[in-house]
Amino acid sequence: ERLKKAGIVIDLVPVPKEISSDCGMCIAFRSQDLEKISALAAEKPGFPGKIKIYQRLEKGRYRQRGEI
């Protein structure tokens, strides 16, 4: 809800198997929204303790970009 109010477009998707074999969901967002998401996570409680950021590469590969 807070992301939507901030004008951030997200998709709720299953965690790619290339990242984790556990069942789970994640959000996909545009890279240009990372700073907004980081600011929202820092200013208010309600986000998980650790948010891992991955960049989707070609052919189903992912690279971890950091944590917030």
Image: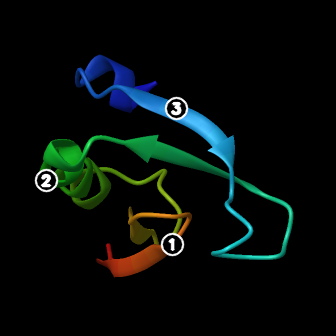
Image location of residue 64, percent across then percent down: 40, 80
Q: Quadrant of the C terminus?
A: bottom left
Q: Which mark, residue 61?
A: 1
Residue under pointer 3: 11
Q: Residues within 10 Å of mark 3 (few under 14, many from 20)?
A: few
Residue drawn at x 41%, y 54% as measured from the top left: 45
Q: Residues within 10 Å of mark 1 (few under 14, many from 20)?
A: few
Query: Quick one: label 2 or label 3, which is nearer the N terminus?
Result: 3
Image location of residue 56, percent across then percent down: 41, 62
Residue under pointer 2: 35
Q: Camera-side residue: 44 or 60?
A: 60
Residue drawn at x 82%, y 76% as measured from the top left: 21
Cβ–Cβ below 8 Å for labels 2 and 1? no
Image location of residue 25, percent across then percent down: 71, 50
Q: Taking 2 as reference, is 29 above or below it?
A: below
Identify the secondary structure beneath mark 1.
loop
The mark closer to the camera, 3 or 1, is 1
Q: Tell me which amino acid carries mark 3.
A: Asp
Position of residue 42 in the picture relative to residue 23 (left or right): left
The mark closer to the camera, 2 or 1, is 1
Q: Tell me which amino acid carries mark 2.
A: Glu
The image quadrant of residue 23 is: bottom right
- Separation of residues labelled 2 and 3 (CA atoms): 17 Å
Identify the secondary structure beneath mark 3.
strand
- Separation of residues labelled 2 and 1 (CA atoms): 23 Å
Q: Residues within 10 Å of mark 2 (few under 14, many from 20)?
A: few
The image quadrant of residue 22 is: bottom right
Query: Quick one: label 2 or label 1, which is nearer the N terminus?
Result: 2
- Separation of residues labelled 3 and 1 (CA atoms): 19 Å
Q: Camera-side residue: 44 or 33?
A: 33
Q: Taking 8 as reference, is 33 above or below it?
A: below
Cβ–Cβ below 8 Å for labels 3 and 1? no
